């Protein structure tokens, strides 16, 4: 763990890096620093000690650097990775895997049992810890548009069905090529990124009365429908008699009632079995616990409540038939059990019920503004102006070239994981279930069975052997 002086040194060294720098030695050093800062911030919050990492990041004005790095990683994952995926050598795919995501477990007090999805989600996790504090939100007021747009894109991917937990596909891993594996890994983190974005959005909306009016208008009038639909998708497994899930394999399909396309229905599960996405993984819940809200559901409910019931938001919200029909989709999720768990939802429930019995009257909407000026996400625009093909060609010949330097980088990150605080419950590196046995070679990854270890071997072998062997 870090001392306050070491944390201050790591924070002072943080700098905004561009798409050209992704995967470079300078980028990897900064990523290692962020990983250590995140571990320390989690430990401080868990032990209720002085959160000196948060104070250093806010005091040094480095929160904006984290926002910039998050957006760079998103652009790289969406526009550069697809170009280089099929041309990556076997060893280099491990580095791309670290840039895209790796699921590990660690207790984080701001979001217990948070799943670290390497680099993009590492940055997202640090921002979640920071944004729990109002002064961190205030320190990047000019970048909140970039962050809310990022969260909007993640929830849009969820609504479009792109963000789904990746199926196990153990029968495919044995013969899939490097490109297919990297794409599968990238797709596998999309749902977790969406859930992290919900948490970040909740912390931002907690300060809705202090946010710029233009940002509030954008969130409620342009992005509100996406958030409402995202709630329906995240909570959709509770629809009617509920779709049936199975663990660990999930195949695309519809729930038995035929009305809700969840993308997670499997004919192999027993009737009535449901899973909830909690602690960054799907877990089977008992029948009596199906109405218990998860942290993810709670965060999304609170974010919606903040946006739809605050006086600041109602000044700009325009009600029409389309928006009314979207809001009405929330109605079936309201009941006394839900409101008893989150009493803060009572005003939102009352608002939805009132809207159900009246027509969408333009007179009830906010007065149209004559102001035609709208803030632009400048960082995102600059990133999209890059020549992604040229960046991909350059990185294939430099940062993803399989040589001794690459082996040393992978070894350094493996050693960094050894310094992480151990979880109170070890989980399988393949299926996520509780595990009692670990790899006898590297002593780092745990497996619940021999089958899971064999299924994970095509990926695990790249980090199992010491560098250079």
Image (cartoon, rainbow, N blue to C red):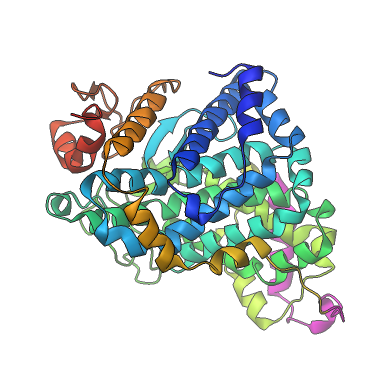
Can you say whether 178 is above or below 248 in the image? below
**Residue depicted at 73% across the width and 59% down the height:** 307
Q: Identify the residue at image location x=48%, y=68%.
A: 387
Look at the image and tell me in which quarter the C terminus lies: top left
Tally the numbered discs.
0
Q: Is residue 360 magenta?
A: yes
Residue 4 horizontal/vertical position (percent):
66, 18
Return the residue nearer the eye: 131 or 414.
Answer: 414
Asked if residue 247 can be seen in this view, the reply is no
The percent coordinates of residue 250 (x first, y second) are 27, 55
Residue at 74% across, 64% down? 351
Q: Residue 188: horizontal and vertical position, in percent? A: 35, 52
Determine if the magenta segment contains residue 16.
Answer: no
The residues colored magenta run 343-371
Q: What residue appears at the point 30 percent right and 29 percent down from the top-left corner?
A: 434
Q: Depth check: 248 or 17 in front?
A: 17
In the image, residue 417 above or below residue 191? above
Say whether residue 84 is left or right of residue 370.
left
- Quadrant of residue 131 within the rendered picture: top right
Of 433 and 144, the residue lying toward us: 144
């Amino acid at each position: 763990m870090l001392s306050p002086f070491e944390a201050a040194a790591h924070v002072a060294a943080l700098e905004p890096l561009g798409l050209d720098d992704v995967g470079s030695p300078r980028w990897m050093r900064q990523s290692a620093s962020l990983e250590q800062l995140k571990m320390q911030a989690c430990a401080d919050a868990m032990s209720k000690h002085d959160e000196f990492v948060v104070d250093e990041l806010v005091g040094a004005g480095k929160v904006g650097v984290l926002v910039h790095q998050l957006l760079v990683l998103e652009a790289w994952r969406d526009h550069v990775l697809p170009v280089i995926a099929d041309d990556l050598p076997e060893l280099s795919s491990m580095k791309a895997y670290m840039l895209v995501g790796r699921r590990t477990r660690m207790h984080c007090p701001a979001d217990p049992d948070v799943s670290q999805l390497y680099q993009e989600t590492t940055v997202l996790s640090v921002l979640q810890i920071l944004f729990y504090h109002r002064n961190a939100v205030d320190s990047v007021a000019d970048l909140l548009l970039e962050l809310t747009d990022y969260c909007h894109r993640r929830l849009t991917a969820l609504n479009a069905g792109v963000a789904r937990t990746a199926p196990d596909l153990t029968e495919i891993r044995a013969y899939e090529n490097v490109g297919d594996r990297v794409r599968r890994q990238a797709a596998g983190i999309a749902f977790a990124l969406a859930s992290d974005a919900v948490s970040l959005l909740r912390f931002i909306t907690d300060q809705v009365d202090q946010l710029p009016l233009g940002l509030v208008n954008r969130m409620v009038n342009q992005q509100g429908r996406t958030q409402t639909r995202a709630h329906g998708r995240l909570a959709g497994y509770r629809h009617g008699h509920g779709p049936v899930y199975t663990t660990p394999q999930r195949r695309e399909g519809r729930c038995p009632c035929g009305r809700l396309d969840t993308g997670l229905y499997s004919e192999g599960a027993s009737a009535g079995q449901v899973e909830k996405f909690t602690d960054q993984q799907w877990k089977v819940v008992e029948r009596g616990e199906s109405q218990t809200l998860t942290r993810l559901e709670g965060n999304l409910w609170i974010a919606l409540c903040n946006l739809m019931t605050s006086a600041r938001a109602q000044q700009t919200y325009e009600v029409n038939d389309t928006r009314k029909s979207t809001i009405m989709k929330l109605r079936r999720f309201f009941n006394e059990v839900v409101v008893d768990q989150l009493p803060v939802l009572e005003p939102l429930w009352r608002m939805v019920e009132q809207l159900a019995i009246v027509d969408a009257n333009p007179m009830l909407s906010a007065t149209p503004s004559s102001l035609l000026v709208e803030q632009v996400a400048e960082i995102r625009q600059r990133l999209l102006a890059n020549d992604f093909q040229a960046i991909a060609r350059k990185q294939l010949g430099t940062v993803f070239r399989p040589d001794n330097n690459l082996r040393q980088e992978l070894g350094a990150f493996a050693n960094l994981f050894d310094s992480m605080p151990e979880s109170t419950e070890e989980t399988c590196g393949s299926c996520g279930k509780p595990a009692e046995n670990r790899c006898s070679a590297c002593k780092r990854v745990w497996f619940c069975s021999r089958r899971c270890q064999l299924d994970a071997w095509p990926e695990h072998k790249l980090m199992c052997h010491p560098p250079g062997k």
